[in-house]
Each structure stands twice: as structure tokens, then as C-alpha cells.
Amino acid sequence: MEFFGQDQILCQKISSLPQIVSWKKSLDSLPAEKVCFEKYLFTAASKVLFGGKPGELLLLREDPSFGDSLNNLLERAKRLTCIWGAWLFVLGIVSLGARIVIYDRGRVNRALKTARNTPLFIKAGYSDFSSAEEFFAEIGRRWEETGEIPHEIGVALGYPLKDVVGFLGLAPLPYIGNYGWKVFGTEEPSIRLRDKYEGAKQAALKFLEEPNKEGVDESPRMLH
């Protein structure tokens, strides 16, 4: 995706957030391995931090370029997401690493509220889980029980309800294509979301590439 227009505007907004600017400046005093990890996590979380995505499912694994154990990486990830204004939930640990969700609690709770009384959630038994943490705990329990992460988690990851329902075969929606996830039924809303999420990632990458600015106004601001 070419970086221009709305992505540039979003990058400028990111550059005005004092907690994000302070974090980026702190990278200058860290060893290369920690910088590599923190930049990786920031980019991976960018769709949640700046793109309105409720949650992002990641596999966090030990990597030589990160130079640390999985437990230490998890603790560092929890501190970083807190600094950035997000939350982190550990679904479980497997041989490959840790399955984690970086999420915005309010957005996930709203997504769960919207889906609560749908046939999808009623049939699957998720209607009683109204908070992000309760829902993710149940997802983790079922994953441990069955060996597969339930596809209903897509509701909390910002995928349109129609696409989750279509993927599970619960409605006769035609398959349209793969736009980062499998899209069913009407194409336009899914493409619009995809572009919004990807725009946030590109803006975050651009922000990381830019040199730190001296004398930045660090009065509190919010990203809208």
C-alpha cells in the first residue's frame, strides 16, 4: 500500500501522542535486541493502537534477534502495551510460543455486546461472556480442550460478523475473496475495514522510520 493521504495524516497524529513519542525516544538507550522486539510489537499492535481494530491475535515466540526468553518477552510485552494504552491477554503457551491478544478493552466489549444475541453466539454458547477478559478466557479454555482456537474469536479481532458467520457456514453467504481474512457477502464493508487497518500499520511504520524530533510538545493529547 502506498503511503500518502490519510496515512500521512494518521502518522502526524501518532507523532503528537506524548506517550508514544516518549516510548520511541526511549529506544535510543536500549540494546539492539530490545529495540528490535519493541519495534516488532509496536508494528504488530498498530492496527489496534491506531486503526480502530478491537484486537490482534499474535504468536509471540523466542527469536534470536530478540535476545531474551519467552517469559521475559511476555513481561516486556505486557508493560509496553500498557504504555501504549492497550491490553494484553495470554490465551496459552504452546511449543511454538505464546498465543496472545493485544486489544482495546472498550472496543472488544462493544463487539461482544453487538454479537451477544446473534445466533452465532447463542449457538456457540458465548452469550454469557460480556467482558473481553471473560471471553478470551473461554476462548483459551476451548482451545486447550479441542486443540483449535475457536473461529468466533474473529468477532473480538474486528472482523465483520457476516464474515465470521460466512466462514463458519452458518449463513448462505457467497465467498468473495481473501482480503487479510476470508470475506463473505457484501465486499465493500470488509475492504473498507481492511484499508483502515492496513493504513494504521503503514502509518506506524512511517512513524518508526522518522527521526526523533527535539522539543516536542508533550501536553496530553488523544488520538481520534
Image (cartoon, helix red, strand yellow):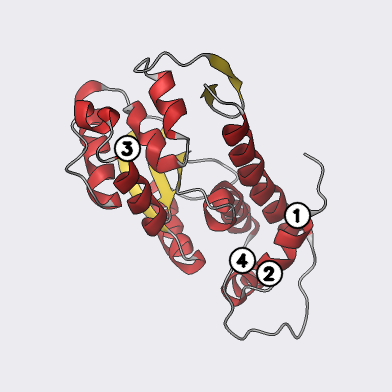
Query: Within 10 Å of the Cα at label 4, are there few (<14), some (14-19), or many (20+) other Cα atoms?
Result: few
Does 210 appear above or below 143?
A: below
Instruction: Indicate which label's residue lies in the foreground, 2 or 1.
Output: 1
Distance from label 2 to label 1 (Cα)? 28 Å
Query: Within 10 Å of the Cα at label 1, are there few (<14), some (14-19), or many (20+) other Cα atoms?
Result: few
Q: Amino acid type of disc 1?
A: Gln
Q: In the rendered image, which quarter contains the N terminus?
A: top right
Residue 168, given in percent of the width and then of the height, sits at 37, 19
- In the image, which disc is placed on residue 28? 2
Instruction: Indicate which label's residue lies in the foreground, 1 or 3.
Output: 1
Q: Amino acid type of disc 4?
A: Leu
Distance from label 3 to label 4 (Cα)? 27 Å
Distance from label 4 to label 1 (Cα)? 32 Å
Pick the front one: 153 or 22: 153
Disc 1, disc 3: CB below 8 Å?
Answer: no
Q: In the rendered image, which quarter contains the C terminus?
A: bottom right
Q: Is any atom of residue 10 visible in this view?
A: yes
Q: Which residue is mark 3?
A: 93
Picture residue at 81% right of the left edge, 53% below the top:
5
Picture residue at 37% right of the left edge, 15% below the top:
169
Disc 2, disc 4: CB below 8 Å?
Answer: yes
Does 173 appear above or below 50?
A: above
Q: Which residue is mark 4?
A: 30
Does 123 appear above or below 83?
A: above
Q: Which residue is mark 1?
A: 6
Query: Within 10 Å of the Cα at label 3, are there few (<14), some (14-19), or many (20+) other Cα atoms?
Result: some
